[in-house]
Amino acid sequence: MFLLLILALTALCAAASEYHERLLLRPLPQNALLASFNFRSNSSQQSFDQQNFRYFPRSLGQILQHAHTKELHLRFSLGRWDAEVWGARPWHGAREGGNGVELWAWVEAESDDEANARWSTLTNALSGLFCASLNFIDSTRTIRPVMSFEPEGTHANASLQLLHGTLPHEVVCTENLTPFVKLLPCKGKAGISSLLDGHKLFDASWQAMAIDIRPVCENGECVLEIEQTVDMVLDLDRSKRPRADNPIPRPLPTEDLECDTSKPYHAEDSCYPLDKGTEPGWSLEQVFGRAIKGSCPLSTEWWGDEMMAGGKTVCINVDPERTVDVRSAKPYGEVKEGHMRCYQLPDGTDFDLELHEEVIPPIPLDQPPLHAARAITGYGQERGGVESVFTNPSLTETLEIVYLESLPWYMKPYIHTLKARLSPAAALDPIKETYYRPASDRHRGTHLELLLTIPPASTLTLSYDFEKAILRYTEYPPDPNRGFDVAAAVVRLVSGGRPEYLRTTTLLLPLPTPDFSMPYNVIILTSTVMALGFGSIFNLLVRRLVAADEVPPTPLVLALARVRGRVGAALRGLLRKGKKE
């Protein structure tokens, strides 16, 4: 009976714990390739509370338990998504963040002070886990959004508080990828995670790593789900170069570039890329430097005697007429659905896809529902301005968006200068709601949230003025003349069904910078004056002047006198001898 109970509990835990992974490949214009890695696993809430981890990473689970965090979203991003060329964002922008590191979480707390303490515990623990500077997310970089974010999970507890922090100056590198991969069940040894290489990921034109943890309840059963996502846009020409010939990514020499010489502005120092009219050829081994090391044995999607509809691990979005060669020593599964071809990885053998260069019309891309841009205006060291431009490309639909800005405390906006202009002009006021929390010097930053409405085929220009603060000389970074990074603005589209997100580019804010050589000059001059003054006064107070015969002889003085007498006698003897000769 006891053995049957153990087997039943084991089967229940195995059923409640699942792991899925999927790779989506989508060719983009201008010889680019979008690679989206998705890893999803879950653990029953009861097993998680008892620290019985199966696929859920223990290191991350214990941090969430200690910090009383019920839902977590962490982003590592680098680069800019070119919506005009690449089309709509992957995952509707829900799995990307602004440049650097972005973190928001729902923390269980009864008061603001308790929430802040647990938020500090969470950021410090994640900083050590992911080798990032998340411990620098203090009160000056933390806000509490009101309209921009909604929980993705199912929460029964009402005492949850949302906190959001950013580090726009954080440089994302291999030190962040390594702990990210270690959270996966196969840890980069098998499955699609074996393609993740820092040299390829951080050489991409745009990349984003995301971790999302949320509770999901269905039919009375609750599980804690973790989803890890890696999205990157690779340049095929640059990625296919062998690392042995190009260990450090460098641009091609001018003589090796393929330029469109028919352009009127073509010259020796300017090159417009040549459009061959063909889809370039590539393979997984050429692009990622390696083939897929078989399937992950822990994945719950597999193909047995019959092909299962859910067993789609690697999918590629290409024209149905394009030839795709598969290299595998063992049998594999394949499903074709329109422009999508999906494959199930074999066990214990390499798997590679190869596409040849062919003349095939490109697949039309989904266009983004909104275009957004933000820039700093004005000049001088005292004041400036911010201008954000939103364009609604739809001819029929009115967009409703939430605009969120988290500004540093030394960038003080004048809310009375906030202006919104529509082009073409319209009678309605585009600003529906405003939430503004002013900054406090060295305590908290500025929190600005706006609910905006954009009519069809219209452009909304949002602008305001701000004042620059003067920092203490100890608050400047080692490279103050570069400028200070301002976090990207978060734009949420609330129209329609599921929310869509996009981030603007980060801003580079120049602040009044003193001449840092002057403190050192002052210190040196002051130290010199102090040394001379102190030394002179000390000598006058302490030194006593006496005659030479008043000084009592000491053994050292007598010894020196005898030596001096002997040396003098020897010298006199030499002189007399010289005169006689």
Image (cartoon, rainbow, N blue to C red):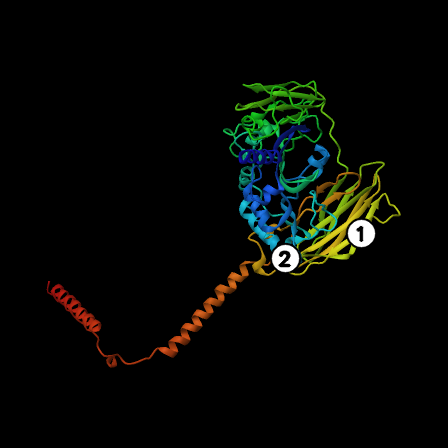
Quarter of the image with the N terminus in it: top right
Dot label at residue 114 = 2
State the image coordinates of residue 527 (x, y, percent, origin top left). Answer: 47, 67
Q: Is residue 133 left or right of residue 87?
A: left
> Circle 1: is it few (<14), some (14-19), or many (20+) Cα within 10 Å?
few
Q: Of callouts 1 and 2, which one flags the residue occurring earlier in the amino acid sequence?
A: 2
The secondary structure type at the circle numbered 1 is strand
The secondary structure type at the circle numbered 2 is helix
Residue nearest the observer in this picture, 200 or 276: 200
Asked if residue 536 is positioned above or below residue 430 in the image, the reply reads: below
Give the residue type at disc 2.
Glu
Q: Is residue 243 left or right of residue 146?
A: left
State the image coordinates of residue 185 (x, y, percent, origin top left). Answer: 55, 35
Give the residue type at disc 1.
Glu
Residue nearest the observer in this picture, 310 or 164: 310
Q: Which residue is under mark 1?
A: 433
The image quadrant of residue 179 is top right
Residue nearest the observer in this picture, 128 or 568: 128
The span from disc 1 to disc 2 (Cα, nearest Å) is 29 Å
Asked if residue 45 is positioned above or below residue 144 in the image, the reply reads: above
> Circle 2: is it few (<14), some (14-19), or many (20+) Cα within 10 Å?
few
